[in-house]
Structures are given as C-alpha cells and as structure tokens.
C-alpha cells in the first residue's frame, strides 16, 4: 500500500525526509548527522539508530572538535567560524548572534561537534586506538558545549558497537581489494574445476569399479590395522599398574588422554573396530551382486552423459531461475518492510517525562502541553509503520512471502529434476544406443515438463514447501524459547524439529523419484509417487546399495576436485610456483581468493555431480521397470545395457545377447 524501497536504502532525518534522495532539498546531503550523539546512550533510544536528539542531513561529517559557545566567541573575530558551523544547524537558521541558551533550547544548532566519518550513511565519531587508549582526533577528552568536560569513552558508549563495525568495514575494504586484483585468477581456478569435474564424470565409466574396490580394500586394511594397533596397546597396558581401572571408576574427565591410559578403552576400541570390519566383509559377501549392479549403473550413467552432454550445463538454467526467485522474494520483502506512513514520537532527555515514546503530530506539537511539561522535548520522526489492520499483519504477510519463495524454489528444482530425468529416460529406453536416442532430448524433455507436468511439479513442490515452512517456524520458536526454563516445552520442540527434519528428507527422496516416474509415464504426481514408492520397496536392497555407493563415489569426487584445485590455488597465491611467480597479484589476505576458489570448486563439482546422480537414479528406476515389464522375448526385449546383462545372467531371447 505504501511500500517505498527508499525507506530501506536512504536514512531519514527528524522530519522523515530522505537523505541523498534526488529531486529533494537533501539531494546533495546523503549523510545523517546527530545533534548530540551522547543522547544515543539514553535508554529511550528507538530502533533503526534513532536517538532522542535532532537529526538532519548533511553533505559531509565534522572534521574537528568545536562547541557553539566557542564558535560564537570566535565569530566576532573571524566570520569563517560561523560559515563552517552553520552547515550542521537546522536549514534556514542564520543568526549566530542569537543567545546560546535559546539556540540550545530550540535546538537550532548542536551544542558541540566532534570529528566524525560516515558509516552506514551516518556520522559517527572517528575512533582511533593509540597505544591501547581510545582517542578521537588524538584527544581523550572534549567539551560537551554545556560547560562540562567529557571522555571519548562516553562517545563510545553512545555509538555502541560502532568501533567494531568500523574495523569490520576496513577488513571488508581490504577483502574487496583482494577480489578486485585476483578475480581473473579466481575465474581461471573455477574453470579448471569445471573441466576436472567434467573429465572425472566421463572417466567414471572406466574407473568406477576400480575406484570403488580400491577404496573398499583401503578401508578394510585401515580398519584391520586399527584392530591390530588397539590389541597392541591393550596388551602393552595390561601388565601396567593402574591401567586396569574401569572407565566408570574414573568418571567423566575433560582431558581425554586419561582414558588412553586404560586398557579397557583400547579393548572397547578393538571390539568396535572388529564389529565394523565383520559388518563390511559380510555386506560385501552377501551383497556383492548388488554392488556390481550399482557400479554398472554408475558406468552407464557416465555413458549417458557422454551421449547427452548438454545435460551438464542445465544447472546454469536452474541457477538463473533460482536467481529470479530470490530477486522476486527480496523485492517483495523490501516493499513490505518499507510499507507504512511516517510515525512521529515524543522524544525527551528528561527521565521522568510521561509523554516519551508516545505518538504525536509535528504540525500541532508546538501548541500542545508536552513542550511545557517536558522542556526540550521534540516530536521527531521515529519509523515508517502504522496502526491499521494491514500494518499489524505485516509479519504474517512476510511469512506468506516466505512460503511463496520456498514454493518457487522447490518448483524450479523439481522442473530441473523432471527435465533431466526425461532426457536420461529417453537414453535408457532407446533399444540401440545411441542410434535410437531422439534428437535434442534435453530440450524435448524441458518442453514436455512445462507443457504437461507443471501442475504435478507444483503440487509436489507445495508439499515440500509446507514442511520446510513448518521447520522454519519451529526454528523461530526454538530461538525465541532459548531462555525458557520449561524443559517439557523444549523437549517437545526438539522432537518436532527432529520429526519434520526426517519428513522433509523423506519427501525430497520421494519427490525426486516421483518426478522420474512422471517423466517416464506422464501420470499425475500422486500416481507417480505411489508407483515409485512400491517399485523402490520391491527393490529396497538395490536402492540402499546404489544410494550409498553413489553418494560415496560422488562425495569422494567432490573432495578430490575441490582439494586438488585448492592445493593448486594455495601454491599459486603463496608464490610457490616459480614459473608464474611474477603473475601473482599482491594481496592483503591470500586466503580470500583461496577460500573462494575452494568453495566455488566444490559448488561447481556439486552442480555437475547432481546431474550425474539424477542420471544414475533415473537409469536405476528404468532398470527396475525393465526387469518387471520385459522378459527378453522378441515381443518384450530388454533395454538394459550389455554390462547389466552379464551381471544378471540375462540373455535377450529376441536376439540381443550380452557382449
């Protein structure tokens, strides 16, 4: 209704006028100045950096200590004193001969000015710490214009937290400089990570099996060594005095090295590792065929991506759509946050003024009794808002905006999953690969998803969004109840958070597989989710093995790519590569581009591997459907690749034999 983003961007003076807004008298006055910043330490300070003192817009902050009394005394000898001081007085006031008491009473000019610098478009004292002492312009004391000498510590208390924010700003400027000088090399590092991710996925068709078994063998050997080491420590401590004390006897100790001196500790370690070793070996023995199927599907996924390379770049489309969703949410939230009309409140420095913080009308304030009962009080702009029904429910509207945002984000992700699933399904159901793959499978799948499946995708996204919305509300309630001492309430809230966390992850898993079934058969969301659920339940062991094998290999790949690119970036930015040592830019913090490259590499690998994981999941559901629908006869030939034929000992009776 009254949304205006300028209320968020620009500071406002005591009359609600924007500082720095073009087309207004304050166009060249972009900084907010406080008449008496010492009043900001008053308990009546309102939100949004509002203080019970006059605030006006200025073009620059003061650069010296001065008081109005000193200015008036020196003005008689030099007019320049007034020319400088009047820029911090109310607009239109130009009477330096007016008695000081009346000027300060009417707050025509500030009683004092202190050296300041702009921060967040507001003038705050220019604090500098010298030899451990807080100073402003090399001074530790100053005159407050009322005949008192004050300490700069009072200024610090008034501008609470500003010194740390100024330090943070200086660090931020240095970080920005580092980005400005190293962005080209950061971009090169991200391109390298993209190429390595692509090569890694394409090589998985040759290395998936070898990589998996090498890692499994390494885990078995490492656990076996751990068992031997625990036994050696246990046998060494067995004969020593005081090593036979049990853990329960010594109780809880903050120094965990105490437990390593007990033989019982190493016995527990040895038994635990032995159980883990036995479980790994038993699982590999009894699930070896399913592990082979999982590895074969991983290899086939790499082949499918090699045939449909455009799928690797679909995450760019998802990123752009998500950026639009975030922009829509942010703009809507800003307009809601800035809605409302100007609210003025009585501000007084008198502690016993009963009108303090009550709403007022600036046009009729001078005729009211408030100025008589509370001398020096003002009707000052406080914030934008209102008392109407609409304004009371701004928070509810923000929650609705959040729900819409979650819905849009989940719909965008669902659209991407359905599009990729349709493209990879067209690969699997091609009898002769790659000859029978339809042209432009990704574009065709994207068009089908938008034309026929928008409702199903939106419904699935809505279910997930509602659960995520409830989780956010629970987190908000948990934050509000941090100081509560009601143990039952905290326990109930913790249980609800745990349950909805599990529900969210289950719905994500089911939605993902439902979108795959939608892309294959074109049924609605509920029917596809039901079919996917029962199909997965009939192949639950294969699902478990494939899921863990895929997660393990992809996690290993993400660490390998981000770690290798990170090591290369570390040697580069620390000038340890002699060949290109002269090309390294000078940096304030070398870890700024380094962490950016590592995080960016991980996100790029995550984007590529998400496509690969979607490919494997789609091929798996198609494989399960292929086994149930077909029998290898001429009328119902298998569509599975030859590698799966050999693993399952299936022979296509229609003449398609494993090779």
Image (tube, grey):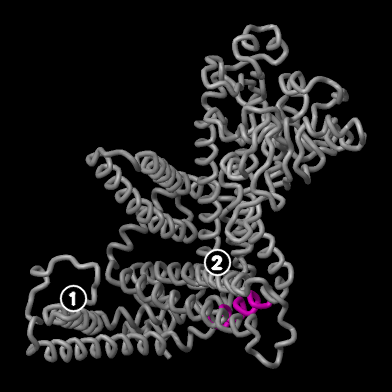
Residue at which label 1 appears: 259
Location of the C terminus (image quadrant): bottom left
| First in sequence: mark 2 vs mark 1 | 1
**Percent coordinates x, y for residue 654 in the rendering:** 41, 81
Residue 12 counted in the magenta span: no
Q: Residue at x 43, y 44 (%)?
A: 472
**Quadrant in which residue 334 is drawn:** top right
Location of the N terminus (image quadrant): top right
Q: Residue at x 74, y 86 (%)?
A: 582
**Percent coordinates x, y for residue 138 in the rendering:** 70, 53
- Most prominent secondary structure in the magenta stretch? helix
Q: Mark 2 near mark 1, Cβ–Cβ under 8 Å?
A: no
Q: Secondary structure at mark 2?
A: helix
Q: Which residues are magenta?
A: 188-200
Q: Is residue 518 left or right of residue 581?
A: left
**Percent coordinates x, y for residue 10 in the rendering:** 72, 38
**Percent coordinates x, y for residue 376 in the rendering:** 66, 18
**Residue in front for this viewpoint, 201 or 52:** 52
Q: Which numbered tag is attached to residue 287? A: none
Q: Residue at x 65, y 59 (%)?
A: 172
Between label 2 and label 1, give the one nearer the viewer: 1
Q: Secondary structure at mark 1?
A: helix
């Amino acid at each position: 209704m009254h949304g205006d983003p300028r209320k968020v961007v620009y500071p406002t003076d005591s009359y609600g006028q924007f500082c720095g807004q073009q087309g207004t008298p304050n166009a060249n006055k972009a900084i907010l100045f406080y008449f008496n910043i010492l009043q900001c330490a008053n308990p009546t300070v309102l939100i949004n950096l509002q203080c019970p003192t006059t605030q006006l817009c200025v073009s620059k902050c003061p650069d010296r200590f001065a008081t109005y009394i000193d200015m008036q005394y020196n003005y008689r000898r030099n007019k320049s004193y007034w020319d400088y001081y009047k820029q911090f007085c109310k607009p239109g006031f130009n009477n330096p001969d007016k008695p000081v008491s009346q000027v300060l009473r009417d707050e025509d000019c500030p009683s004092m000015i202190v050296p300041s610098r702009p921060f967040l478009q507001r003038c705050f004292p220019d604090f500098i710490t010298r030899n451990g002492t807080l100073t402003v312009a090399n001074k530790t004391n100053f005159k407050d214009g009322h005949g008192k000498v004050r300490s700069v510590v009072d200024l610090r208390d008034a501008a609470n937290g500003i010194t740390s924010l100024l330090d943070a700003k200086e660090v931020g400027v240095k970080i920005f400089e580092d980005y400005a000088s190293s962005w080209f090399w950061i971009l090169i590092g991200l391109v390298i990570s993209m190429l390595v991710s692509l090569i890694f996925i394409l090589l998985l068709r040759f290395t998936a099996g070898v990589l998996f078994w090498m890692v499994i063998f390494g885990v078995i050997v490492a656990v076996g060594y751990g068992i031997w080491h625990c036994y050696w420590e246990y046998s060494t401590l067995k004969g020593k005095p005081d090593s036979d004390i049990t853990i329960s006897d010594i109780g809880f100790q903050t120094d965990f090295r105490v437990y390593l001196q007990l033989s019982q500790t190493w016995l527990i370690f040895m038994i635990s590792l032995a159980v883990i070793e036995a479980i790994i070996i038993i699982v590999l023995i009894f699930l070896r065929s399913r592990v082979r199927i999982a590895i074969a599907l991983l290899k086939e996924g790499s082949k499918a991506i090699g045939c449909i390379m455009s799928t690797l770049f679909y995450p760019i489309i998802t990123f752009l759509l998500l950026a639009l969703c975030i922009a829509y949410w942010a703009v809507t939230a800003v307009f809601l946050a800035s809605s409302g009309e100007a609210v003025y409140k009585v501000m007084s420095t008198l502690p016993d003024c009963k009108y303090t913080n009550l709403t007022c009308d600036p046009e009729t304030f001078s005729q009211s009794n408030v100025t008589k009962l509370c001398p020096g009080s003002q009707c000052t702009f406080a914030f934008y808002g209102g008392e109407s029904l609409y304004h009371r429910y701004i928070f509810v509207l923000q929650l609705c905006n959040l729900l819409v945002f979650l819905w849009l984000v989940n719909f965008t992700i669902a659209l991407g999953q359905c599009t990729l699933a349709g493209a990879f399904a067209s690969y699997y159901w091609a009898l002769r690969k790659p000859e029978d793959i339809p042209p432009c499978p990704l574009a065709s799948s994207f068009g089908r998803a938008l034309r026929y499946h928008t409702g199903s995708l939106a419904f699935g996204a809505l279910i997930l969004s509602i659960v995520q919305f409830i989780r956010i509300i629970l987190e908000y309630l948990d934050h509000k109840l941090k100081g509560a001492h009601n143990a039952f309430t905290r326990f109930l809230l913790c249980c609800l958070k745990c349950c909805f966390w599990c529900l969210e992850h289950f719905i994500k898993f089911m939605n993902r597989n439902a979108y795959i079934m939608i892309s294959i058969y074109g049924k609605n969301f509920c029917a596809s989710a039901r079919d996917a659920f029962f199909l997965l339940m009939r192949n639950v062991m294969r699902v478990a093995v494939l899921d863990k094998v895929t997660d393990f290999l992809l996690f290993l790949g993400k660490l390998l790519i981000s770690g290798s690119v990170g090591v290369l970036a570390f040697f580069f930015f620390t000038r340890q590569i002699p060949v290109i040592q002269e090309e390294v830019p000078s940096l304030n913090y070398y870890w700024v581009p380094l962490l950016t490259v590592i995080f960016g590499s991980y996100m790029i690998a995550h984007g590529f591997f998400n496509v690969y994981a979607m490919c494997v999941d789609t091929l798996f559901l198609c494989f399960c459907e292929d086994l149930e629908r077909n029998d290898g006869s001429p009328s119902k030939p298998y569509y599975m690749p030859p590698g799966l034929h050999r693993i399952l000992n299936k022979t296509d009776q229609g003449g398609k034999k494993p090779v």
